[in-house]
Amino acid sequence: VVSLTGPLDDPFSGGQSVNVTWTSSDTNIGTTPILLTWSTDNFATVNNTIVSGQAASGTYAWTIPSLNTSTFQMRARAT
């Protein structure tokens, strides 16, 4: 199980720098299995990569792209 731990409920703004944090409780997923993505349509059709090949738990400094949307989500998953 991979959990996105931050930022969670903050309102996001385009151009804002955030520290994306995640943890994993699975010990069988390898050393760099994590893919971070973002979407503006609840991942129905759009999955934009933030970064891939990250450690099972960690922090990644990311600048949110300029967006014209009121719906924005981030996700962490094992690959």
Image: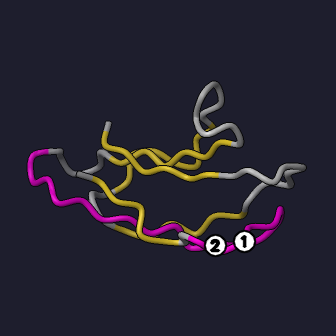
Crowdedness of circle 2 by 10 Å Cα count: few (<14), some, many (20+)? some
Extreme residue toward the top, this view: 45
Q: Residue 62, percent across and down? A: 63, 64
Please report the residue visible at 68 percent of the width from the left and 37 percent of the height from the top: 41
- For residue 15, side relative to residue 53 (left or right): right
- The residue carrying mark 2 is 18
The image shows residue 44, relative to residue 15, as above or below, that is above
- Of tags 2 and 1, the one toward the viewer is 1
Would you identify the image quadrant in which residue 45 lies? top right
Please report the residue visible at 36 percent of the width from the left and 68 percent of the height from the top: 58
Q: Residue 53, percent across and down? A: 39, 46
Look at the image and name its color scheme.
Answer: secondary structure
Separation (CA) of disc 2 from disc 1: 11 Å
The magenta stretch is 9-28
Crowdedness of circle 1 by 10 Å Cα count: few (<14), some, many (20+)? few
Magenta stretch encompasses residue 25? yes
Given the image, on which type of amino acid does mark 1 rest? Pro
Please report the residue visible at 53 percent of the width from the left and 69 percent of the height from the top: 8
Q: Secondary structure at mark 1?
A: loop
- The residue carrying mark 1 is 11
Q: Secondary structure at mark 2?
A: strand
Given the image, on which type of amino acid does mark 2 rest? Val
Q: Nearer the viewer, residue 65 or 45?
A: 45
